């Protein structure tokens, strides 16, 4: 899926494309900003700094973009980076590790300025389409148990809670809810 435009609304609708190596630095700054904006109010600043200094470096973003087992999608409105998602292809399903062709939605970030403006649904549609195109059967994700807005969004897009897993933010061991959904056309049509 290269440079796929998603026309889901009025002028200013987002376009979705695959990230390239040239996006690594901007993506690093964007991801760190959105993560901090979303989670800093509820976390220790030292834990936040420790996590951000490792998770969102330009080098790490470039590595993920180049990794053949990952797909990094960027949502833009005009020339503005509005959101991004990172999918890991063939990631073991957290609900049922025997499920073949599971795709992990490892990151899904939309800048707060673009909430409620069609960016997140367009990006989610692109993620589901990408998982299908890669012959995925299921897509799963981990979402902080205290992030009610994100949980509602994922539920609206067919994800169901199937358990929990640990997430380490600096020295703080937190709990993520694990959510999963089918991405097969036949399952999606009957849901």
Image: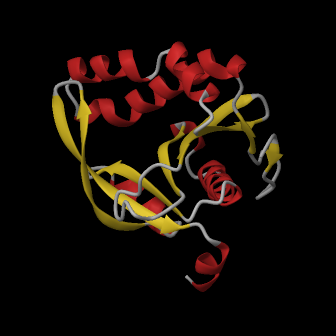
Query: Residue at coordinates 59% horizontally, 51% vertically from top-left?
Result: 120
Query: In the visual, does 115 lie left or right of 161?
Result: right
Identify the image quadrant of residue 93: bottom left
Residue 112 % position (x, y) = 51, 39
**Which residue lies most toward the bottom here?**
190
Q: Nearer the viewer, residue 71 or 114?
A: 71
The residue nearer to you, when weighing 23 against 82, is 23
Q: Is residue 5 above or below residue 77?
A: below
Seen in the picture, residue 40 relative to 9 is either above or below; the reply is above
Quadrant where the C terminus sits is bottom right
The residue that appears at 60% across and 76% down in the rendered structure is 188
Left/right placement of residue 14 relative to residue 34 reads: right
Question: Residue 13: where, in percent of width, then height?
Answer: 76, 48
The chosen color scheme is secondary structure
Would residue 65 appear left or right of 59 to someone viewing this image?
right
Q: Name which quarter of the figure residue 77 lies in.
A: top right
Looking at the picture, tell me which residue is in the foreground, 54 or 35. 54
Q: Residue at x 54, y 58 (%)?
A: 101
**Count the marks: how many?**
0
Q: Where's residue 138, x and y in %?
A: 51, 63
Rendered residue at 46%/21% (across/down): 56
| Residue 100 higher or lower than 147, as above or below | below
Classify 26 as above or below 90.
Answer: above
């Amino acid at each position: 899926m290269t440079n796929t435009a998603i026309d889901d609304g009025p002028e200013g609708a987002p376009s979705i494309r695959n990230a390239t190596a040239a996006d690594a630095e901007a993506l690093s700054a964007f991801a760190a900003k959105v993560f901090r904006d979303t989670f800093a109010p509820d976390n220790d600043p030292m834990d936040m700094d420790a996590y951000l200094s490792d998770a969102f470096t330009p080098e790490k973003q470039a590595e993920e973009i180049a990794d053949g087992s990952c797909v990094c999608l960027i949502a833009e409105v005009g020339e503005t980076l509005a959101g991004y998602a990172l999918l890991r292809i063939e990631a073991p399903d957290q609900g049922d590790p025997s499920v073949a062709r599971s795709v992990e939605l490892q990151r899904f970030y939309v800048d707060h300025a673009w909430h409620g403006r069609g960016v997140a649904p367009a990006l989610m549609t692109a993620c589901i389409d990408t998982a299908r195109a890669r012959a995925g059967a299921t897509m799963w994700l981990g979402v902080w148990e205290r992030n009610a807005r994100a949980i509602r969004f994922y539920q609206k897009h067919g994800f169901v809670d199937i358990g929990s897993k640990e997430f380490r933010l600096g020295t703080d061991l937190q709990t993520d809810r694990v959510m999963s959904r089918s991405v097969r056309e036949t399952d999606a049509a009957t849901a």
